[in-house]
Amino acid sequence: MIDYSSEIRTVLLNNPVLQTELTKFYNQPAIFNTYVPEDQNYKNPLPRIVIYEINNAPSSYADNDIYSQTLRFQISIFTKYNPTAIKKAVDEEMRNLGFFRTSSSDQFDEETKTIHIPMRYRKEFY
């Protein structure tokens, strides 16, 4: 099993566009793995990114050993403003890591007036 969430987060944290576009959470861009921590000083920081590992499984075998593994991640962007710069920065960094985007959509939550962009990526490891 490959742990890649931390590497993705580190790469996104170091992106200059994301450093300026995202809300700061303890002096770092608001980028989280799996959930947004509860903190009284930061109630729902926007814009932010949440990284979700969707799948991490062997995809092929040779001689009863794992030959390749497929990793799938969802990078969710939450914002109330134009997400174009954030989307482009995320997509560029994920492509630089060897992932390719399998889907992306813009969803608007009428109740919270928040845009949610789930961007899904896949990579095969040999």
Image: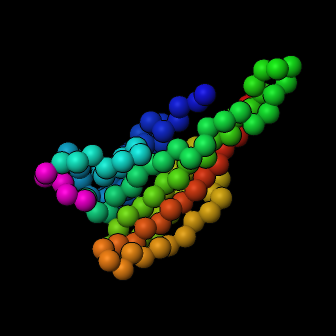
Q: Where, by quadrant of the figure, is residue 60 drawn? A: top right
Using the image as rendered, state which of residue 4 and residue 57 is in the foreground. 57
Q: Is residue 96 above or below residue 57?
A: below
Q: Position of residue 59 (x, y in %)?
A: 75, 37
Question: Seen in the image, is 19 located left or right of residue 63?
Answer: left
Query: Where, quadrant-wise, is the C terminus in this rendering?
Result: top right
Using the image as rendered, state which of residue 125 and residue 92 is in the foreground. 125
Give the magenta range. 40-44
* Marker count (numbered): 0
Q: Verify whether residue 33 appears in magenta.
A: no
Q: Where, by quadrant of the figure, is residue 65 drawn? A: top right
Question: Seen in the image, is 21 located left or right of residue 105?
Answer: left
Q: Is residue 28 above or below residue 17?
A: above
Q: Residue at the right extreme?
A: 63
Q: Position of residue 99 (x, y in %)?
A: 63, 48
**Residue at horizontal 85 percent and vertical 24 percent from the top:** 62
Q: Position of residue 36 (x, y in %)?
A: 31, 49
Query: Where, quadrant-wise, is the N terminus in this rendering?
Result: top right
Q: Verify whether residue 43 appears in magenta.
A: yes
- Whether residue 116 is visible, yes or no, is yes
**Residue at horizontal 47 percent and vertical 66 percent from the top:** 117
Q: How is the image coloured?
A: rainbow
- Whether residue 85 is visible, yes or no, is no
**Residue at horizontal 60 percent and vertical 43 percent from the top:** 55
